[in-house]
């Protein structure tokens, strides 16, 4: 057998193994690298390469030590799952959106995974005084203790799916502070409906953020465009800037810019800042 033929056979075997991995993960909900390696008689390194390929195809989500299934029938995916989807796009969106934040400002973030990507970029800069208000547990933890950044956490009920705090307990805070900019992710974004979320509770707290802020900056990767989610929290005419990636649909980009909305598309030349440890 020639080297080329051998390589082709290996590719076939890898694809067959990956299809079987998908079936196992879908049936069981999750799988561990060590268990998969033993089942298929290959090394853990080989299984990890399989999982990287499958995640790139958006068929599973890698976790520490294994993988979990993507249940797209659910209205809202868990934070751990969403954080791994479109990770490269979110990192670049985060780098571009972070440049819109100025020292001395008071800004608000929702609990979205894209907002977390913006927060990670803020940590790479020196701040004299930046005030961040959020309902995101992961985001608050990310920025807490960073020199020059004060973090205010909204009160309410904790939603484990989104690692967020929702409810009316945090509404009063917005009446006592001035918010320059709100950075908001979304489960869906259309010109007609604006920014929308998968749940009413998340939409309500985001609507309060929109009302409180002088400027609304949408941070949405291309998979959310032209997709209507359950509950609208911000109409298109209230959006000032949209930060997305290069795969955003051109027709909708033209429509938004025609309405006076600035659209920033972070591409390969928008290198994310180093996130450190």
Image: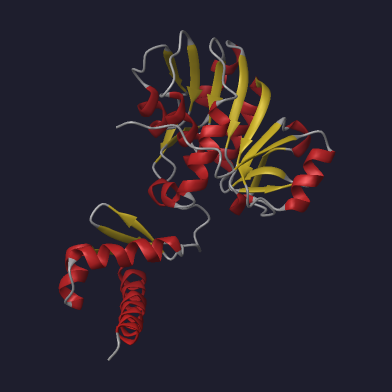
x and y percentages locating residue 154 in the rendered image: 47, 23
Question: What residue do we see at 45% from left, 49% from top?
Answer: 82
- The answer to whether residue 35 is above or below residue 179 is below
Q: Residue 97 vs residue 250: left or right?
A: left
Q: Quadrant of residue 200?
A: top right
- Colour setting: secondary structure
| Residue 191 seen in render | no
Q: Nearer the viewer, residue 10 or 96?
A: 10
Question: What residue do we see at 46% from left, 24% from top?
Answer: 122
Q: Name the image quarter holding the C terminus.
A: top left
Q: Nearer the viewer, residue 61 or 169?
A: 61
Q: Nearer the viewer, residue 167 or 66?
A: 66
- The answer to whether residue 117 is above or below residue 247 is above
Q: Nearer the viewer, residue 57 or 150?
A: 57
Seen as rendered, the residue at the extreme right is 258
| Residue 163 seen in render | yes
x and y percentages locating residue 222 in the rendered image: 61, 51
Total tally of numbered discs in the picture: 0
Q: Quadrant of residue 181?
A: top right
Seen as rendered, the residue at the extreme bottom is 1
Q: Quadrant of residue 150?
A: top left
Question: What residue do we see at 40% from left, 32% from top?
Answer: 274
x and y percentages locating residue 66 in the rendered image: 26, 59
x and y percentages locating residue 104 in the rendered image: 54, 9
Q: Name the image quarter holding the N terminus.
A: bottom left
Q: Residue 117 vs residue 242: left or right?
A: left
- The answer to whether residue 68 is above or below residue 190 is below
Question: What residue do we see at 74% from left, 38% from top?
Answer: 235
């Amino acid at each position: 057998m020639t080297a080329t033929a051998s390589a082709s056979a290996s590719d076939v075997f890898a694809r067959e193994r990956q299809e079987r991995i998908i079936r196992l993960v879908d049936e069981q909900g999750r799988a561990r690298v060590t268990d998969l390696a033993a089942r298929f008689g290959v090394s853990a390194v080989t299984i990890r390469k399989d999982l990287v390929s499958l995640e790139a195809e958006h068929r599973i989500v890698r976790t520490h030590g294994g993988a979990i299934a993507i249940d797209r029938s659910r209205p809202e995916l868990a934070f751990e799952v969403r954080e791994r989807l479109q990770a490269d796009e979110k990192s670049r969106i985060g780098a571009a959106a972070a440049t819109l934040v100025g020292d001395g400002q008071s800004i608000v973030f929702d609990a979205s995974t894209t907002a977390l990507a913006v927060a990670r970029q803020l940590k790479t800069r020196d701040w004299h005084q930046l005030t961040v208000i959020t309902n995101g547990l992961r985001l608050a933890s990310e920025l807490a203790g960073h020199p020059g950044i004060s973090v205010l956490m909204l009160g309410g009920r904790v939603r484990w799916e989104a690692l967020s705090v929702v409810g009316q307990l945090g509404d009063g805070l917005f009446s006592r502070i001035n918010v320059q900019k709100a950075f908001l992710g979304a489960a869906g974004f259309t010109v007609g409906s604006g920014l929308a979320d998968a749940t009413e509770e998340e939409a309500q707290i985001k609507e309060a953020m929109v009302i409180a802020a002088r400027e609304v900056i949408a941070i949405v990767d291309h998979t959310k465009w032209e997709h209507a989610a359950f509950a609208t929290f911000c109409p298109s005419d209230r959006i000032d800037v949209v930060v997305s990636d290069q795969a955003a649909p051109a027709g909708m980009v033209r429509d938004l810019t025609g309405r006076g909305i600035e659209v920033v598309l972070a591409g390969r030349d928008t290198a994310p800042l180093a996130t450190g440890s």
